């Protein structure tokens, strides 16, 4: 009988493989993305000291107020714009994109493209 790994375990394994390849530094922090069934979260992290420099999620009141739903491609694009603007305000221009083991399509791709348009380079 073929044993199939859970999707959660497969994603965690992919994420660890990705994280072994790169980490965020002070000059080029890491833009980490997590998506749950209901919300999306984005953080810009300096891994050398373990600090979150900028964060945004669809749970925040001002972001949630702008959205009809918090778990679709439009919400992801808006979140990407917000995280990009906040990062540029803090003086962060270049980041390393950490897709968190998720496939680069749909919501993850929409967030990344919106962050690029807002001024982040990766």
Image (cartoon, grey):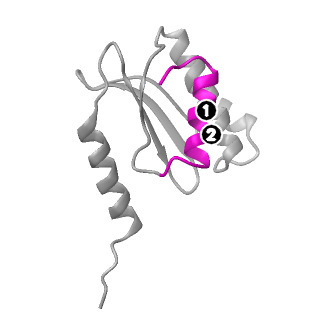
The residue stretch that appears in magenta: 103-122
Near-viewer residue (110 or 71)? 110
Dot 1 falls on a residue whose secondary structure is helix
Membership of 115 in magenta stretch: yes
Seen in the picture, residue 75 relative to 102 is either above or below; the reply is: above
Quadrant of image for the N terminus: bottom left
Say if 100 sits above or below 55 in the image. Answer: below
Q: Where is residue 3 in the image (x, y as percent from the top left)?
A: 30, 82
Picture mark count: 2
Image location of residue 95, percent across then percent down: 42, 22
Neighbour tally class for label 2: few under 14, some 14-19, many 20 plus, Cα within 10 Å: many
Residue placed under numbered mark 2 in the picture:
110
Label 1 environment density (alpha carbons within 10 Å; few <14, some 14–19, many ≥20):
some
Q: Position of residue 6 (x, y in %)?
A: 37, 70
> Which residue is rendered at x = 56% and y = 34% of the image?
112
| Residue under the point 63% across and 50% down | 71
On the picture, is 21 further left or further right than 98? left
114 displayed left or right of 12: right
Residue 2 is labelled as none
The label shown at residue 113 is 1
Query: What's the residue at 47%, 25% (across, down)?
Result: 122
In the image, residue 87 sits, relative to residue 106, either above or below, namely above
Residue in the picture at 31% in, 25% down: 24
The quadrant holding residue 81 is top right
Q: Do the residues labelled 2 and 1 touch (CB within 8 Å)?
A: yes
- Residue 4: image quadrant is bottom left
Q: Distance between the residues labelled 2 and 1?
A: 5 Å
Residue 46 in the image, given as x and y percentages of width and height: 32, 22
């Amino acid at each position: 009988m073929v044993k199939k790994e859970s999707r959660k375990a497969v994603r965690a394994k992919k994420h660890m493989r990705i994280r072994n390849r790169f980490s965020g530094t002070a000059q080029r922090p890491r833009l980490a993305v997590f998506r749950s069934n209901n919300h999306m979260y984005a953080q810009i992290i300096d891994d050398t000291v373990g600090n979150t420099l900028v964060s945004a999620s669809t749970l925040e009141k001002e972001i949630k107020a702008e959205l009809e739903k918090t778990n679709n491609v439009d919400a992801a694009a808006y979140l990407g714009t917000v995280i990009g603007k906040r990062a540029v305000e803090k003086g962060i221009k270049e980041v390393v994109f950490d897709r968190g083991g998720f496939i680069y399509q749909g919501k993850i791709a929409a967030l990344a493209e919106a962050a690029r348009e807002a001024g982040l380079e990766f």
